[in-house]
């Protein structure tokens, strides 16, 4: 949810924008992988600690990518 709010603010879209729409906007403006964005932005349960680590790393990577494009 924090990543969704942060991206919505950065890209000037309403905070309640659907995750797949936000992923599309961010991908179009930054060249980031849309499927990866959508996965990180969707509220889905993580299966285990390994998946949680991957999610955290993905969120950090997305933030870094966006900071270099905005």
Image (cartoon, helix red, strand yellow):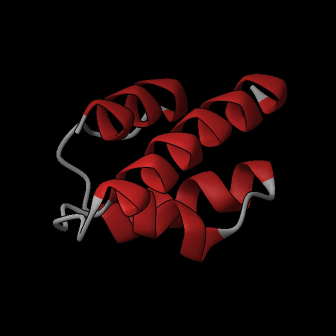
Image mark count? 0
Residue plotted at (22% across, 39% down)? 1
* Left/right of residue 5 with respect to residue 51 in the rendered view: left
Which one is in front, 27 or 56?
Answer: 56
Which one is in front, 47 or 9?
Answer: 47
In this picture, is 34 found above or below 62? below
In this picture, is 2 found above or below 58? above
Residue plotted at (61% across, 31% down)? 63
Q: Position of residue 25 (x, y in %)?
A: 55, 57
Residue plotted at (72% across, 50% down)? 29
Q: Position of residue 62 (x, y in %)?
A: 62, 42
* Left/right of residue 12 with respect to residue 36 in the rendered view: left
* Left/right of residue 12 with respect to residue 14 in the rendered view: right
Residue plotted at (38% across, 70% down)? 20
Q: Which residue reaches farthest bottom?
A: 35
Q: Position of residue 10 (x, y in %)?
A: 52, 25
Q: Position of residue 70 (x, y in %)?
A: 74, 25
């Amino acid at each position: 949810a924090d990543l969704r709010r942060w991206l919505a603010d950065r890209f000037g879209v309403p905070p309640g924008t659907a995750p797949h729409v936000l992923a599309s906007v961010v991908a179009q403006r930054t060249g980031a992988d849309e499927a990866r964005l959508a996965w990180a932005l969707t509220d889905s349960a993580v299966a285990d600690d390994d998946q949680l680590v991957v999610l955290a790393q993905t969120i950090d990577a997305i933030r870094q990518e966006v900071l270099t494009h905005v």
